[in-house]
Image (cartoon, rainbow, N blue to C red):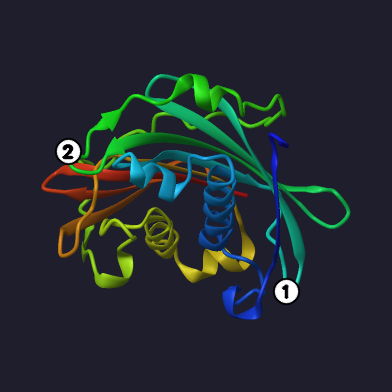
Amino acid sequence: MELVGNFTFKTESYLLDFRGRATLPIIGNYMLHAASSHASSRGFGFSDMTERHTAWVLSRLAMELYRYPTMSEPVTLYTWIDEVGRLFTQRCFEMLDTEGKTIAYARSIWAAIDMQTRRMTPLDVEGLSKYIAMRPCPIEKPGKIAPIENETDGEPYKVKYSDLDINGHFNSIKYIEHFVDAFPLDMFKSREIRRFEISYLLEGRYGMPLMLHKKETGEHEYSLAFCHENKAVCRAKAVWT
């Protein structure tokens, strides 16, 4: 069995933004689809984990994009396991266009949790390590995102039905949607998010009142956070070019 998964997507008009380009959340969805399909074909997908009363949770994600796919553009997405530890495993992605040029790279960190206790469980290191692929992913790993929630006032938000995933918790891509929506439209008219990092810290639930914080922390760099009762539920960092 091939260690590297290979998936093809074609952008559709109803998934594009006002510029006719795929959005950051859509690209994130492509990656999660590829990750889920790749894991399922190798015996550790959603159904397999459910039988063990466990579930995969995305802990961190870092994406670097050199350009965004446009209307009706076919893209190929490769995904593979890069590292396996006792509690976390790392999965990488590379997106290419029809000419074989790289559009984006991404690194993600995953953990398995017990579906009842919601606590992390040890991974099957031996079983997962069989699928490690020695394919390069030349971007920095997700790093620690500086807290900014105590430095800004924040805007209130309450978790809604459309935010929830199959486990009844705040969907990982929905966080990305809300974070990119925190920027004014004019920024998207002349600039792009080149690198985006996100760190999931706590599970958001339906009706949970959150505060959305944003702060410019460097030249073309912003930190964001969703907080509940002064505790960060999720943090992100966006670097623009």
Instruction: Answer with mark 1 or mark 2, whichever residue precedes in sequence.
Output: 1
Q: Does 231 sit above or below residue 162?
A: above
Q: In which quarter of the image is residue 166?
A: bottom left
Q: What is the distance, in whole Å, between disc 1 and disc 2 at their CAs? A: 44 Å
> Amino acid type of disc 2?
Thr
Depth order, front residue of 122/183 = 122
Q: Quadrant of residue 131?
A: top right
- Asked whether residue 9 appears in the rendered view, the answer is yes
Q: Name the residue under label 2.
A: 117
Depth order, front residue of 56/42 = 42
What's the residue at 67%, 31% (across, down)? 137
Considering every residue shown, the one lying at the far right of the view is: 99
Q: Is disc 1 placed on a helix, strand or loop?
A: loop
Q: In this view, does 4 lie to the left or right of 85?
A: right
Please state which of the two labelled residues, at mark 1 or mark 2, is closer to the viewer. Answer: 2
Depth order, front residue of 1/135 = 1
- Position in image of residue 54 (x %, y %): 31, 40
What's the residue at 17%, 38% (across, down)? 117
Q: In this view, does 61 lie to the left or right of 166?
A: right
Considering every residue shown, the one lying at the far bottom of the view is: 14
Q: Mark 1 points at which residue?
A: 71
Q: Does 17 sit above or below residue 209?
A: below
Considering every residue shown, the one lying at the far left of the view is: 229
> Amino acid type of disc 1?
Met
Q: Is residue 59 left or right of residue 12?
A: left
Q: Is disc 2 placed on a helix, strand or loop?
A: loop
Q: Does 23 sit above or below residue 83?
A: below
